[in-house]
Amino acid sequence: MDVIQNLIESISWDVIIGTSVRVLLILIIGLALMSATKLLLTRLEARLITQSKRSGENPGEATKRIETLIRLVRQGIRVVLWMTILLVVLKELGVDVAPILASAGVVGLAVGFGAQNLVRDVISGFFFIMENQVRVGDVAIINGTGGLVERMNFRTITLRDLGGVVHVFPNGNVNTLSNLTRDWSAYLMDIGVAYKEDPDHVIEIMREVGAELREDPVLGQHMLGDIEIFGVDKFGDSAVTIKARIRTLPIRQWDVGREYLKRLKRAFDEAGVEIPFPHRTLYFGEASKPIALELAERARRQREVADDDATSRADFTSNIDTNG
């Protein structure tokens, strides 16, 4: 008991209480700085979105770009702030932070040599964000794989494809990046019709369906103009291909395009326009009509012979019944 009592008496409670109070104040200040940073970034985000709307930028595009940038800035500030708080707390506890900082510098140098891919990923991610190449919410094709950008940071980009599969790409390994929803999108169509159809008539029907779709109260507001018809694009094995395009708001091209194709199919059916399937037709030049007449005449003669045979058999059967 005397040993414990002497130990308790030897403790400098003033120092412990003072250190505890200072550490507590440091933590409170750190939490306050985190809250203030979050509030300032939220206001900055709202202000940037408002300014982008005033400048005429698409609201959805501006929101995706600004949210991605603010989220990454918030992550960076959080890491720096908590590292600073940790060093200050260690110093208050009597730990010499100078060797820690020196060791961190040496370790950082070693990690820099040993983790070149990580450094490359971070640098690439920084330029992706600063150059506004892709944002969370975009539909992109990265290294040949397409999907919706779900997450993005300084190291990786995460895509989810139409089948629900998640693909994670390190930023430094991104060789090709195609953004399908940057500023505006488009639905490109190759409409095939039979060779017997008049291209001008088909194009007129396509324009009418496009104008009708633009009057739609839901999908029409996503279109950025009338349908663009480029004309006859190529002659296929069984169809004449007419190329067209509908420009839409970002990521709305599939909704508008699918509805347009559905209405176009209905319009073609009503107008009697043939949408061909692969088949082959044999032409014999000027001899086509005579050959067709000859085949028809031959079929008529075969039917007459069959009818005569049937009549003869019926008469023969009738005679047998009568004589019998």
Image (cartoon, helix red, strand yellow):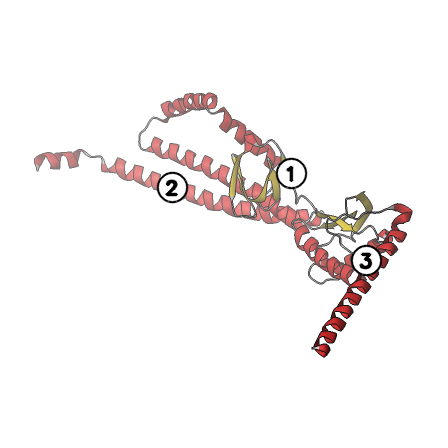
Seen from the viewer's position, the closer of residues 59 and 263 is 263
**Residue at numbered disc 3:** 205
Q: CA distance from mark 1 to mark 2?
A: 45 Å
Q: Nearer the viewer, mark 2 or mark 3?
A: 3
**Residue at numbered disc 2:** 27
For image coordinates 66% across by 55% down, the residue present is 255
For image coordinates 72% across by 78% down, the residue present is 322
How many residues crowd mark 2 within 10 Å: few (<14), some (14–19), many (20+)? Answer: some
**Which comes before the other along the chain, label 2 or label 3?**
2
For image coordinates 61% across by 48% down, the residue present is 63
Q: CA distance from mark 1 to mark 3?
A: 33 Å
Describe the element under mark 3 as helix, strand or loop: helix
Q: Which mark is residue 245?
A: none
Q: Is residue 147 above or below residue 311?
A: above
Q: How many marks?
A: 3
Q: Nearer the viewer, mark 1 or mark 2?
A: 1
Q: Position of residue 94 (x, y in %)?
A: 31, 30
Q: Which residue lies most toward the left here?
A: 1
Describe the element under mark 1 as helix, strand or loop: strand
Q: Amino acid at mark 1?
A: Ser
Seen from the viewer's position, the closer of residues 118 and 28 is 118
Circles 1, 3 touching at the beta carbon (< 8 Å): no
Describe the element under mark 2 as helix, strand or loop: helix
Q: Is residue 99 left or right of residue 114?
A: left
Q: Position of residue 297 (x, y in %)?
A: 86, 58
Q: Is residue 87 left or right of residue 249?
A: left
Q: Which mark is residue 178?
A: 1
For image coordinates 65% across by 47% down, the residue present is 61
Q: Nearer the viewer, mark 1 or mark 3?
A: 3
Q: Amino acid at mark 2?
A: Leu
